[in-house]
Image: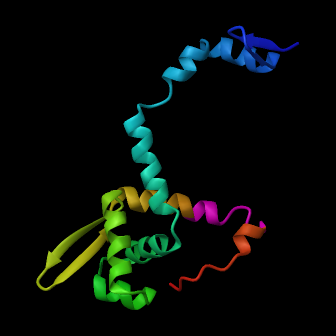
Amino acid sequence: MPHRIGSEVRIPERVSESLERLGGLEQVTRSIPPRIVVKRVSGIFQSLSDPVRLSILYALSMTPLCVCVIKSILKIADSLLSYHLDDLKSAGLVTAKTEGRFIVYRITDLGRELLSTCGRLGTTGATRKADRIQVGVQV
């Protein structure tokens, strides 16, 4: 028999019992991080959602690289590369350091950890149709 939250929303008994065990709806609501944390995590996932940015992270996971080498690998325009590197830097996934006339990018510990997770995701369920779609980025 369905239960209710308040006087309006009916919920299944199993969900109601689970909520009770957890301390109620208020406890579940309190377990959600503050909005600023959720927004930061969302931004990181947005950065990881782009094939070009993932390709940059994979390349940087091998060794620090200057912009000219990353450009050579990805074969994209300077402005587009700059946009993607800025995004990765803002997300805390890469750092940049000027070395003479060059800017050298390095993957951060966070970037390395998340890339490792992405790699594990990429090896599971590889027969799904979405996983067979070719991405236009060559690494």
Is residue 126 shown in magenta? yes
Residue 101 in picture, x, y percent from top left: 13, 86
Residue in the foreground of this view, choosing between 40 and 57:
40
> Residue at coordinates 35% horizontally, 58% vertically from top-left?
109
Q: Nearer the viewer, residue 126 or 15?
A: 15
> Colour scheme in the image?
rainbow
As displayed, is residue 114 above or below residue 103?
above
Q: In the rendered view, does 94 fall on the left or right side of 130?
A: left
Q: In the orientation shown, which residue stands out farthest toward the front? A: 8
In the rendered image of this protein, does residue 24 appear above or below residue 101?
A: above
Answer with left or right where residue 112 lies relative to residue 26.
left
- Position in image of residue 131 (x %, y %): 70, 70
Looking at the image, which residue is at 23% across and 70% down?
Answer: 96
| Residue 78 within the magenta-colored segment of the rendering | no
Q: Which residues are magenta?
A: 119-128
Q: 63 or 111: nearer the eye?
A: 111
Query: Where residue 114 appears, x then y in whole percent?
Result: 47, 57
Q: Residue furthest left?
A: 100
Q: Main secondary structure of the magenta part?
A: loop
Residue occupying image coordinates x 38% and y 79%: 80
Q: Residue at x 53, y 58 (%)?
A: 117
Q: Is residue 127 above or below residue 78?
A: above
Q: Quadrant of the N terminus?
A: top right
